[in-house]
Image (tube, helix red, strand yellow):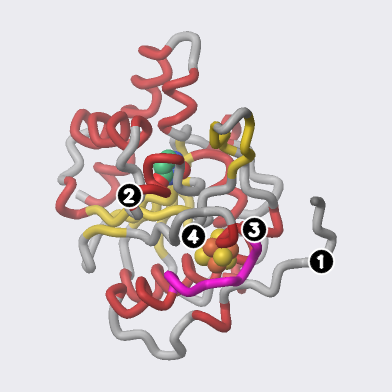
Amino acid sequence: MQRTDAPIGAQQWVPPHPRSIDELKPAAADCHGCELYENATQTVFGRGAPHAKIVFVGEQPGDVEDRHGLPFVGPAGRLLRDAVDDAGIDPAELYITNAVKHFRFELRGGRRIHQNPGPAHITACRPWLVSEFSLLKPKLVVILGATAGKALLGPSFRVTRSRGQLMPWPASAQHPEDFPVAEIQAIATIHPSAVLRADDRETAYRGLVDDLRVAAAAVA
Ligand code: URA
Ligand code: SF4
């Protein structure tokens, strides 16, 4: 069924004065800010170092993440870990999360097929992302793919146009006021799932690592 009402959004589930990510996570587990909680197994919140220098933002949990309750633990996560390693980024300095925190899928012949989250899901889920940034205070955000770009920069974001370049953030967002957080830097790159799908996987992987090297240098 196609819904026409805009979702109410996550804000009312976000604790008013959270002191730590550990306080956000159980609150997000109860979120009904959009309809995606209805069919997914659980909320998949971000994880990583509470004082991470770099925050990675992906799209949404996939099938494996939905079942395990942790971001980037499936095939895309394995590829991302390799790329982080090859770029010389210390994994202990990372926090990793998603623009949308429930898995959106379509059932086809008993299989759960990934569906991109829509603009309404991205907007509904943004309060969690904002609250993560306000607690983490990283130096840099790595935007993984189009959905994260739309969430953090605005609907006109295109990966191919912006990848690999450092930019001030949230100043570079279409609506910086959506992010009442301290000014940091951002860099966009392709999503690790796009590397897995690429015809020329090796070139795509090298491109991802090159972008992550820029990220590594920016926080060194
Ligand atoms: N893809 C994402 O964007 N996030 C995950 O957590 C897993 C796959
Ligand atoms: Fe809440 Fe985000 Fe899940 Fe929607 S996707 S129910 S806004 S946590």
**Rendered-image quarter of ligand 2:** bottom right
- Queried on whether the Cβ of the residue with tag 3 lies below 8 angstroms from ligand 2, the answer reads yes
Read off the residue under disc 2.
68
Does 44 appear in magenta?
no
Q: Residue at x 35, y 59 (%)?
A: 46
Q: Residues within 10 Å of mark 2 (few under 14, many from 20)?
A: some
**Near-viewer residue (180 or 131):** 131
Instruction: Give the residue drawn at x 30%, y 54%.
Output: 54
Q: Which residue is mark 3?
A: 121
Label 4 within 8 A of ligand 1 by Cβ: no
Q: Are marks 1 and 3 in contact (CB under 8 Å)?
A: no
Q: Which residues are magenta?
A: 28-35
Residue 165: x and y in percent read 46, 40
Q: Is mark 1 within 8 Å of ligand 2?
A: no
What type is the residue that disc 2 sits on? His
Sequence-earlier tag: 2 or 1: 1
Spatial CA distance of label 4 from label 3 is 22 Å
Circle 1 sits on which residue? Answer: 5
